[in-house]
Amino acid sequence: MTTPQPAMLKWDNETLSRFWGYYSQFPELYFSRQKGRDVIKFVSGMIPKNAMVLDYGCGPGHLLPYLLDEGYTVLGADISLETIGSAVNVRGRDNFMGFDTIDGLLSSERKFDAIFLLEVIEHLDDQALELTLSQARRLLKKGGLFVVTTPNEERLEDSMVYCPVANVIYHRWQHMRSWSAAQLADTLSSRGFHDVKVETRNFRDISTPKVLQAKLLISEIFNRFRKPQSILATARG
């Protein structure tokens, strides 16, 4: 019997929910858990200490404790409330304003001094990308800071895997598009964001505070000689 050629997996809400519900069990795989604190440190000088900050697409919530540690007033939001914040215990912490859906925030006309959109845009098709950036602009105060990260010039084909049960191929982390710094800068500028600044860099994993200083030093030296793994964009509303 000839096996038919595998098709590309078509992601829908049910498939996405199962996929991320499974991977939420593995916090060490999340960029926001590994690198989130370093991202915040890098942009903290652009955000007032008493700022109201939104983690847009917060998922299990790994970024939220780091934002609270910086003294911000913080809210986490995602499309669905089913698994939102499932990886962290931040309820009851000072300045934590809870969780909401994106639609809920828009209907209440909330506005934020800063919005973090970390490792989200690589997961979006054209329609979802337009919607996400439009919603972020609506939620951002005039002059507020928009922070975006995404992998730098990722070769999507390198992370394709095959499921023999369904006979489909898919990106192992559900990435749908690859970004360059120039593409991201143009996308944000053309969607109404101002003062757009984009750079490539390697963020340090400083989520574990007891890492030996020697190990950190070696990592810093190594990072100087390898291709930057991340794109960081900042823009104003």
Image (cartoon, rainbow, N blue to C red):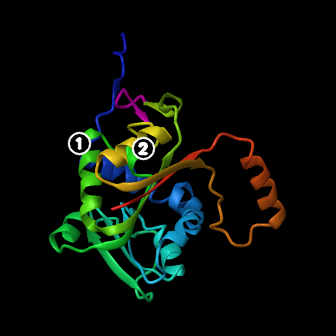
Image height of 3 relative to 208, above or below: above
Residue 84 is left or right of residue 71, and the answer is: left
User: In the rendering, at what x and y percent does residue 166 appear?
Assistant: 34, 31
Mark 1 or mark 2, which has the lower sequence index?
A: 1
User: In the rendering, at what x and y percent does residue 129 appear?
Assistant: 29, 46
Front residue of this view, candidates 202 and 199: 199
Front residue of this view, candidates 8 and 205: 205
Residue 11 is left or right of residue 73, and the answer is: left
Magenta run includes residue 98: no
In which quadrant will I find the C terminus? bottom left
The residue that appears at 37% across and 15% down in the rendered structure is: 3
Magenta run includes residue 170: yes
SS label for mark 2: helix
Residue bearing mark 2? 184
Front residue of this view, candidates 87 and 175: 175
Q: Quadrant of residue 209?
A: bottom right
Residue 30 in view of the camera: no
Image height of 47 relative to 12, above or below: below
Q: Are marks 1 and 2 in contact (CB under 8 Å)?
A: no
User: In the rendering, at what x and y percent does residue 130 appear?
Assistant: 25, 46
Q: Amino acid at mark 2?
A: Leu
Identify the mark at residue 161; answer none if there is no mark: none
Residue bearing mark 1? 127
User: In the rendering, at what x and y percent does residue 15 appear?
Assistant: 30, 45
Residues shaded magenta: 163-171
Badge 1, how many Cα within 10 Å: few under 14, some, many 20+? few
Front residue of this view, candidates 122 and 8: 122
